[in-house]
């Protein structure tokens, strides 16, 4: 027999641990206690609980998608545009953090040798399509004066 506690545990695992940021706009409040990622909304939880078939994370996801398809409205007061801008800023921050990690690794002789043998067209194309390469090449340009081709 499935108990309500099992359903609630599945909702918590699906929502708070894996989709907290995604469902936050649909929550009427955020509760941060021992875990900063804990997102709770009695209203949203009850709506998901009513749609779930089994006490699983997959069932919680299906219930949430069903609610969205039925027109579940965000309760955070943000417009879709503001929500998209916030997501874009979060993504940009992640990219900047990744670039900082890549820049912290010293350039190798092999990398510098490969940069020297590349034509301007090859550099331009690779910089446009490969963020790792762009970061490493730009670092070589900063440190050793390599020409940056836009």
Image (cartoon, grey):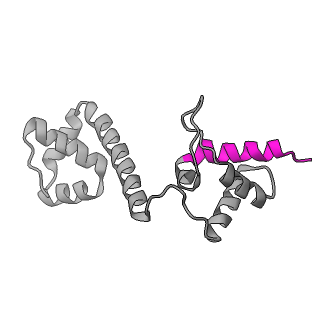
Identity of the residue drawn at 54% across and 60% down: 74
Q: Indicate the position of residue 76 as horizontal and vertical percent values.
A: 50, 55
Quarter occupied by residue 49: bottom right
Q: Indicate the position of residue 86 as horizontal and vertical percent values.
A: 39, 53
Query: How many tags in the picture?
Result: 0
Q: Is residue 33 magenta?
A: no
Quarter occupied by residue 129: bottom left
From the viewer's perspective, is 12 left or right of 1?
Answer: left
Compared to residue 28, the image places residue 63 above or below, namely below
From the viewer's perspective, is 19 left or right of 5?
Answer: left
**Residue 59 appears in view:** no
Q: Indicate the position of residue 99 as horizontal and vertical percent values.
A: 30, 41
Q: Which residue lies furthest to the bottom in this view?
A: 70
Q: Indicate the position of residue 59 as horizontal and vertical percent values.
A: 74, 56
From the viewer's perspective, is 125 left or right of 11?
Answer: left
Stretch in magenta:
1-20
Identity of the residue drawn at 54% across and 50% down: 24
Quarter occupied by residue 30: top right
Identity of the residue drawn at 70% across and 54% down: 60
Work out whether residue 99 or residue 136 is closer to the camera in this orientation and state it: 99
From the viewer's perspective, is 36 left or right of 143?
Answer: right
Identity of the residue drawn at 81% across and 54% down: 54
**Residue 8 appears in view:** yes
Name the chief secondary structure element in magenta. helix
Work out whether residue 54 or residue 27 is closer to the camera in this orientation and state it: 27
Q: Is residue 5 magenta?
A: yes
Q: Quadrant of the C terminus?
A: bottom left
């Amino acid at each position: 027999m499935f108990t309500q506690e099992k359903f609630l545990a599945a909702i918590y695992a699906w929502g708070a641990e894996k989709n907290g940021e995604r469902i936050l706009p649909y929550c009427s409040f955020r509760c941060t206690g021992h875990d900063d990622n804990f997102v709770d909304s009695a209203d949203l939880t009850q709506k998901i609980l009513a749609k779930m078939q089994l006490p699983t994370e997959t069932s919680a996801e299906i219930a949430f998608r069903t609610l969205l398809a039925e027109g579940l409205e965000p309760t955070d007061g943000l417009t879709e545009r503001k929500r998209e801008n916030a997501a874009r800023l979060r993504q940009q921050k992640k990219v900047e953090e990744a670039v900082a990690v890549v820049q912290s690794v010293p350039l190798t002789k092999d990398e510098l040798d490969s940069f020297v043998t590349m034509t301007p067209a090859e550099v331009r194309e690779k910089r446009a399509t490969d963020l790792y390469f762009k970061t490493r090449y730009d670092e070589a340009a900063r440190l050793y004066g390599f020409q940056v081709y836009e």
